[in-house]
Image (tube, rainbow, N blue to C red):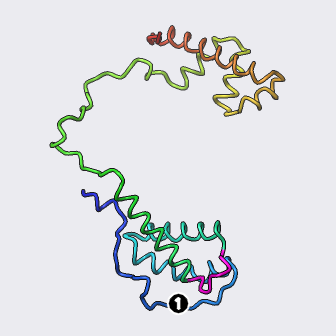
Amino acid sequence: MTLTSYLPVCKPTLGMGDPVEFLTSKATTIDAALADARPVLLRIAARLCATSADAADLVQDTLERAMRVGLPADVKNPRAWLTTMMHNLFIDRCRAAARGPQHEPLDEVHDNITRLDLDHHEPAWTRATIDDVRAALDKINPMFREVYVLHTFEDRSYEEIAAHLKISRVTVGTRLTRARLRLRKVLVERLGLEAKP
């Protein structure tokens, strides 16, 4: 696969001076201008971009930028203004893609890449399951277990746990840390896992 397959296609099929239907527009507000110009922008973007997804993204980026900038008072033709803005965005994308890293296929030519050792055994800790963790929770102090369950299994924030248990946020963090240390010790003893230093 070559670099060009990752880049938007910069086709010079549409020049800014080409006679297309965006040359006349009566819209005076940004909302009206966007609604009026969107179908035209989509058609032009489809000619510029390699895929319909790229074209839709280009139009979306153009509309977002136009909403941020607003319709300048001196613009007499909003469609032409939006088309120019989109064309400039497209050129910027082409330049950015050209400056980006080149993608090369991985094949036999790349002999300096470390190969995965398929015969290598996974570390012992990968054998621990959720059921092992739940069973090990019964072996730790209920005060620590409650905080651990609320945070890990119920996905509650420190603030929610503190409010629920009527303790401080710092205490929640302390109990959670102690719960993890005790849980790790129980799992090491239970499953014969090697404890990290």
**Magenta segment includes 73:** yes
Left or right, residue 185 beside residue 47? right
Residue projecting furthest to the left = 109
- When asked about the image quadrant of residue 5, the answer is bottom left
Q: Nearer the viewer, residue 1 or 26?
A: 26
Residue projecting furthest to the right = 166
- The overriding secondary structure of the stretch rendered in magenta is loop
Q: Which residues are magenta?
A: 71-79
Residue at (57% x, 81% y) in the render: 37
Residue 63: horizontal and vertical position, in percent? 58, 71
- When asked about the image quadrant of residue 122, the answer is top left
Residue type at mark 1 is Leu
Residue 127: horizontal and vertical position, in percent? 44, 22
Q: Is residue 88 above or below residue 182?
A: below
**Magenta segment includes 1:** no
Left or right, residue 70 beside residue 90? right
Q: Nearer the viewer, residue 182 or 173?
A: 173
Q: Nearer the viewer, residue 118 or 3?
A: 3
Residue at (60% x, 66% y) in the render: 64
Residue 105: horizontal and vertical position, in percent? 24, 49
Q: Is residue 148 above or below residue 29?
A: above
Residue at (67% x, 77% y) in the render: 30
Residue at (69% x, 11% y) in the render: 141
Residue 91: horizontal and vertical position, in percent? 42, 68
Quick one: quadrant of the N terminus? Answer: bottom left
Q: Which residue is mark 1?
A: 23
Left or right, residue 159 beside residue 197? right
Q: Secondary structure at mark 1?
A: helix
